[in-house]
Image: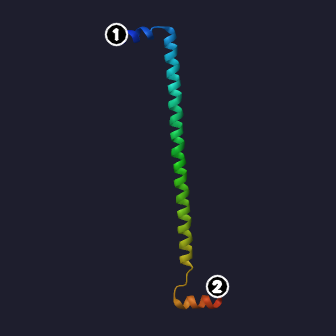
Amino acid sequence: MLATTLGGLIARPWARRVIRAALAALTVALFLFNLRRSGERAGRAVERLEILEAVSHAQRKMLEEAASRPRSRDDLLERLRDGEF
């Protein structure tokens, strides 16, 4: 009985137009939802990249400072006496 009712409803031209419009609206809504999710993923990727850049910059600074540190106590005393430290 339900199949007969639905079949009779789909046979009418106005019902087909309504169904077409509903399917078009559903397609647009799903497209927009997918676009929003893609934007969120891109935003998270940018955030991860910024964090990695900050960490890399901090590590680079630490390595540069470690390379220029005094190698022994004598070197440290020499730098302190010269006022370079």
* In the image, residue 15 above or below residue 44: above
**Left of 66 or right of it: where is 81?**
right
Amino acid type assigned to the residue bearing label 1 in the image: Met
**Left of 3 or right of it: where is 22?**
right
CB contact under 8 Å: marks 2 and 1: no
* In the image, residue 69 above or below residue 2: below
Q: Nearer the viewer, residue 33 or 84?
A: 33
Q: Residue at coordinates 57% horizontally, 91% vertically from top-left?
A: 77
Amino acid type assigned to the residue bearing label 2 in the image: Glu
Check residue 1 in the rendering and tell me which mark sits there, or answer none.
1
State the quadrant of the C terminus.
Answer: bottom right
Q: Count neighbours of disc 1 (C-alpha within 10 A) and say few if under 14, some if 14 to 19, many if 20 or more.
A: few
Check residue 31 in the rendering and tell me which mark sits there, or answer none.
none
Check residue 84 in the rendering and tell me which mark sits there, or answer none.
2
* In the image, residue 19 above or below residue 47: above
Say what secondary structure mark 1 lies in. Answer: loop
**Residue 8, position as x, y percentages in the image:** 42, 8
